Image: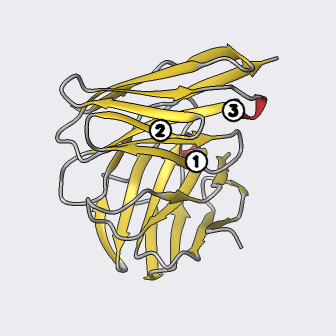
């Protein structure tokens, strides 16, 4: 089967660093995406990894290890506005853009 | 205008009603998608359209009927729904539906409640 696991909830303090993990088992792999979704809003794209290693984009970084079926999203210098759900999604094989999503990690940032 | 617009934002319907959800994208994309988001569950892909042609129906019950008249518009026609169909229905678009395409752009969703 196809499965993507990520923690349900996390809490962190403003100004701190938090790491959200994602493990996956899918039929084929064509890239891993991270999306941010604030309550009542559209998911918005954060990062994309297709090769092993770290991709850095401002306060957000994403890491991928294809051999381990593992990714993480690292958020630095946390701000209150970072309180949101973070969705991990894998593009499986099959000839077209089919994303399989995890259930999301709800992050609460406290002062 | 935001990139992907969905209407209505909220919809309450009875099990015998017929209603439609509408999605419009202003990004010049050629692929459009319907996803279902239920509480504490992963987004579920329902349908994919690429250049107006349906390329994926993810075993969706026939009470959900999609329509894609052109690359900018996507509809989801609803009839004789069940209470368990209550969810947030998200529309998304991407440049194409190929595996090398970029990220999905999502609308804000239509919150559906079936009584």
Q: Residues within 10 Å of mark 2 (few under 14, many from 20)?
A: few
**Of tags 1 and 2, which is closer to the observer?**
2
Examine the image and state in which quarter residue B19 appears: bottom right
The residue located at (51%, 20%) in the rendering is: A19
| Foreground of the two, A82 or B55 | A82
Local SS, label 2:
strand
Residue A43's label in the rendered image is 1
* Distance of label 3 from label 2 (alpha carbons): 17 Å
> Which quadrant is the N terminus of chain B positioned in?
bottom right
Q: Which residue is mark 3?
A: A82
Q: Residues within 10 Å of mark 1 (few under 14, many from 20)?
A: many
Please determine whether, in this image, residue A13 is positioned above or below residue B52.
above
Q: Give residue B29's position: percent from left, percent from top.
A: 45, 75
The residue located at (55%, 38%) in the rendering is: B38
Q: Give residue A11's position: percent from left, percent from top.
A: 66, 15
Examine the image and state in which quarter residue A100 appears: top left
Q: Which residue is mark 2?
A: A56
> Which quadrant is the C terminus of chain B positioned in?
top right
Q: Residues within 10 Å of mark 3 (few under 14, many from 20)?
A: some
> The disc numbered 1 marks a residue on which chain?
A
Residue A95's label in the rendered image is none
Q: Using the rendered image of the protein, determine whether residue A56 is visible from the camera's viewpoint.
A: yes
Q: Give residue A35's position: percent from left, percent from top.
A: 52, 42
Q: Using the rendered image of the protein, determine whether residue B61 is visible from the camera's viewpoint.
A: no
* Distance of label 1 from label 2 (alpha carbons): 20 Å
Label whose residue precedes the other's in the sequence (1 or 2):
1
Same-subunit check for callouts 1 and 2: yes
Circle 1/circle 2 CB separation < 8 Å? no
Label whose residue precedes the other's in the sequence (1 or 3):
1
Please determine whether, in this image, residue B11 is positioned above or below residue A37.
below
Circle 1/circle 3 CB separation < 8 Å? no
């Amino acid at each position: 089967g196809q499965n993507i696991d990520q923690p349900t909830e996390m809490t962190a303090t403003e100004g701190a660093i938090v790491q959200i993990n994602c493990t996956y088992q899918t039929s084929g792999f064509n890239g891993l995406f991270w999306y941010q979704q604030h309550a009542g809003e559209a998911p918005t794209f954060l990062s994309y990894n297709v090769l092993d290693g770290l991709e850095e984009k401002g306060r957000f970084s994403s890491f991928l290890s294809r051999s381990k079926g593992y990714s993480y999203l690292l958020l630095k210098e946390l701000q209150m506005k970072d309180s949101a759900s973070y969705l991990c999604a894998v593009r499986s094989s099959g000839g077209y853009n089919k994303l399989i999503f995890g259930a999301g990690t709800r992050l609460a940032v406290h002062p | 205008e935001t990139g992907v617009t969905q209407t209505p934002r909220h919809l309450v319907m009875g099990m015998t009603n017929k209603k439609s959800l509408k999605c419009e994208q202003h990004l010049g994309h050629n692929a459009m998608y319907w996803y279902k988001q239920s509480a504490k569950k992963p987004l579920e892909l329902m349908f994919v359209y690429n250049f107006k042609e349906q390329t994926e129906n993810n075993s969706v019950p026939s009470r959900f009927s999609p329509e894609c008249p052109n690359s900018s518009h996507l509809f989801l026609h609803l009839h004789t729904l069940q209470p368990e169909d209550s969810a947030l229905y998200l529309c998304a678009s991407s440049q194409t539906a190929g595996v090398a395409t970029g990220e999905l752009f999502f609308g804000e969703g239509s919150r559906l409640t079936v009584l």
